[in-house]
């Protein structure tokens, strides 16, 4: 039976599962990405992000589950989906001994794009690559390689981009420029599903999902994901924070301790018990109640999974 498409969503999938032998890589994952929305997909390496993305875009057939991508059934109409999405892999997968324009022309031929030379010129112009068009891909920095890969994704004018850790190993300025481009594309109605490890990128997404060991642990806006865990967090400033961290991990009400430079974040779900413990243990150090941030929450979620021990972080 073909899944019924909801025109409100670029991606609408339910109960996706995928196993390789005895390893259950993706477990009952359900996602909805609205048209024109940037949806951030977060999780540690090996969590199932790439496998989920490949099932959504038609590269992998799920063992079970259903849904649509751009209105097409992800099981029965995979070929139609592959023609209409732009997929950017983790690794740079172009020919380093060809120039930027030669790489893009080759991709345009693969998609059988009409008037491909005009399409290539448009992609070069839109991504600020015209001045470097004749430069060999192997001579590009990470940021320019990333920009060329995005140009290749956009050649056939897809309505959905699936980006698998596109900014890994790229310098902060290039990452910022890349995300400015994604925001511009989303404003034009293009949907984006992007996996990332960076918290500064996560907060730029309209919605987020966190996956670990194949399971979706939380999803929603950044504010909704933070609120869903009901954590209270204190920041402690001072010296000998490593010693204090070891001590606090044994105290009541403390469910997580994380050091960020010269500040120790201490989190727990019982606000009053945590307050008493922090005040009793600070030892003259400055302690202040702060807003729990995304990184606090994601470290907490990771620590809660049974596969990771499920104990205090």
Image (cartoon, rainbow, N blue to C red):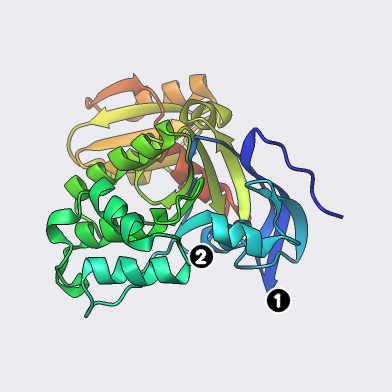
In this view, the residue in front, 216 or 311, is 216
Rendered residue at 41%/31% (across/down): 187
Left or right: 161 in relation to 70 = left
Q: Position of residue 196 (x, y in %)?
A: 40, 51
In depth, the one of 218 and 243 nearer the eye is 218
Query: In the rendered image, is residue 250 in sight?
Result: no
* Pointer 2 or 1: first along the chain: 1
Q: Which mark is residue 22?
A: 1
Question: Is 95 located above or below residue 48 in the figure?
Answer: below
- Tell me if I can see residue 65 in this picture: yes
Checking the image for residue 107, the label placed there is none
- Would you name the residue on which mark 2 appears? 46
Q: Secondary structure at mark 2?
A: loop
Q: Residue furthest front?
A: 115
Q: Residue furthest right?
A: 1
Q: Where is residue 53 shown, x and y percent of the image?
A: 55, 58
Q: Answer left or right for 90 relative to 46.
A: left
Tell me if mark 1 has few (under 14), some (14-19) or many (20+) residues whose alpha carbon lies within 10 angstroms of its own: few
Across and down, in percent, residue 58 comes to 62, 63
Q: Residue at x 49, y 50 (%)?
A: 158
Residue 303 against residue 213 in the figure, above or below: above
Q: How far is disc 2 from disc 1 in space, using C-alphas?
A: 15 Å
Q: Look at the picture and state if 18 lies above or below 20.
A: above
Quadrant of the frame with the N terminus: bottom right
Towards the viewer: 149 or 230: 149
Discs 2, 1 touching: Cβ within 8 Å = no
Q: How many marks?
A: 2
Q: Residue at x 69, y 67 (%)?
A: 61
């Amino acid at each position: 039976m073909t899944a019924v498409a909801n025109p409100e969503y670029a991606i609408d999938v339910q109960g996706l599962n995928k196993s390789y032998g005895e390893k259950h890589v993706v477990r009952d994952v359900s996602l909805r990405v609205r048209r024109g929305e940037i949806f951030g997909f977060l999780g540690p390496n090996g969590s199932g992000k790439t496998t989920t993305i490949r099932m959504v875009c038609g590269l992998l057939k799920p063992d079970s589950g259903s849904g649509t991508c751009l209105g097409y059934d992800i099981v029965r109409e995979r070929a139609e989906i592959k023609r209409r999405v732009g997929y950017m892999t983790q690794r740079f997968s172009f020919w380093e001994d060809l120039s930027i324009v030669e790489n893009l022309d080759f991709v345009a031929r693969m998609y059988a794009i009409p008037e491909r030379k005009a399409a290539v010129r448009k992609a070069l112009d839109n991504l600020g690559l015209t001045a470097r068009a004749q430069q060999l891909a192997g001579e590009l920095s990470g940021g320019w390689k990333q920009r060329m890969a995005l140009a290749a994704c956009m050649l056939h004018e897809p309505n959905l981009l699936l980006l698998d850790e596109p900014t890994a190993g790229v310098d902060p300025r290039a990452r910022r420029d890349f995300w400015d481009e994604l925001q511009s594309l989303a404003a034009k109605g293009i949907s984006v599903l992007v996996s990332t490890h960076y918290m500064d990128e996560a907060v730029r997404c309209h919605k987020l999902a966190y996956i670990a060991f194949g399971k979706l642990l939380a999803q929603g806006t950044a504010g909704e994901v933070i609120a869903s865990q009901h954590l209270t967090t204190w920041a402690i400033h001072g010296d000998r924070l490593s010693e204090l961290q070891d001590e606090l991990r044994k105290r009541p009400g403390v469910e997580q301790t994380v050091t960020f430079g010269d500040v120790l974040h201490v989190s727990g779900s019982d606000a009053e018990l945590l307050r008493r413990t922090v005040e009793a243990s600070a030892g003259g150090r400055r302690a202040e109640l702060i807003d729990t941030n995304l990184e606090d929450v994601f470290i907490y979620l990771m620590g809660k999974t049974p596969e990771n021990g499920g104990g205090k972080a």
